[in-house]
Amino acid sequence: MNKIGIIGAGLIGSSWSAIFASKGYEVYVYDNDKQVFENFNERVEGFLNELKFIDEEIDLNKSINKINSNIEIEFLCKTCDFIQECSPEIISLKQELFARLDNLSPKEVILSSSSSAMPISLITQNLKGKERCIISHPANPPHLIPCVEISPSESTSQNTINLTKKVFDSIGFSTVYVQKEIDGFILNRLQGALLNEAMRLYSEGYASADHIDSTVRDGLGLRWAFMGPFETIDLNAPGGIKDYIKRYGSIFSEMAKHQRSVPDWTEKNAEKLEKERRTFLSKEDLKIRAEKRNNLLKSLRKLKKDMHEDVSK
């Protein structure tokens, strides 16, 4: 498998294009909105430069030349071995798109979705080729966060699962295998748990948004940059994880009993948060801050690579 099809040339599609091309794949990109290609090359070149900061061996010109943009969907389907769909998170749109991909591509081609929350069985419920369909959900931006969730349905074949893992292993990604379907998969459910508690603490007046952010940014996040929650608690008690649970498990059990209320995600609370956030970051500076985020991410990736903590080492 050496030819990758990308459906959607926005931020996620551009990011996928950069990472696959940098690892030697021929990449073919389709989008029904032709205007998106006006800035596509500029986006991809920027992403490739960020990747080269992490891995100096990447050849920028060679990578750029491997990307074939603004390709017709029919040509993409008959040419590529693996297709990664990156359309908006609208169920009817994804269902229609997968129906086209299923009809246009040979039966051995794997059809993969970047969906953030929808299980593949919902997207492919009326397809003949369900066995070759799978979720491959990235973190954002994919080229800087090398983690992808592989989530099959009961209809997905083992061959599809194996080949999909092989594709992402080949580009140096950490592959999270979701063993059974669940809305939001693993990443967004973990993120959702933290977001819901953050929103609850904010809306009930326990702390400001910035102080809640700093608890993660300057506290928990420093550990989480190189270890997950289970490894964290395994190291936080003298006798390891079982010892930690014995010492502190009841604290978390008691907290969970009082976390059953739905946090305030209303428009009123959103307006309050918006006003508070804009005192720290103006709307005009959102893009600048996102660019700095990417610079911080690539520097962190480089540090982890140098310290032999990066999955793509």
Image (cartoon, rainbow, N blue to C red):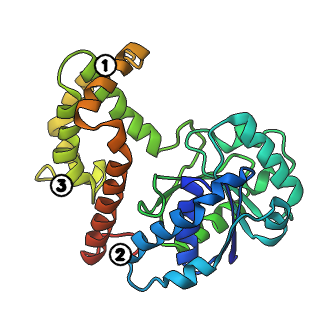
Residue ID at (77%, 43%): 124
Seen at 21% across and 53% down, the residue is 223
Q: Nearer the viewer, mark 1 or mark 3?
A: 1
Q: CA distance from mark 1 to mark 2?
A: 39 Å
What residue sits 89% from the left and 54% below the top?
Answer: 103
SS category of the residue bearing label 3: loop
Residue 26 spot, x, y in % from top left = 67, 77
Determine the secondary structure under disc 1.
helix
Q: Amino acid at mark 2?
A: Phe
Q: Is residue 1 above or below residue 173?
A: below
Amino acid type at image mark 1: Lys
- Can residue 38 be seen by looking at this rendering? yes
Q: Does residue 168 appear anywhere in the picture?
A: no
Q: Rounded to the nearest whole Å, what is the CA distance between mark 2 and mark 3?
A: 32 Å
Please tell me the numbered disc located at residue 53: 2
Count of marks, rendered view? 3
Name the one closer to the observer, 284 or 21.
Answer: 284
The residue tagged 3 is 235
**Are the residues at dot 2 and dot 3 in contact (C-beta closer than 8 Å)?**
no
Under mark 3, the amino acid is Leu
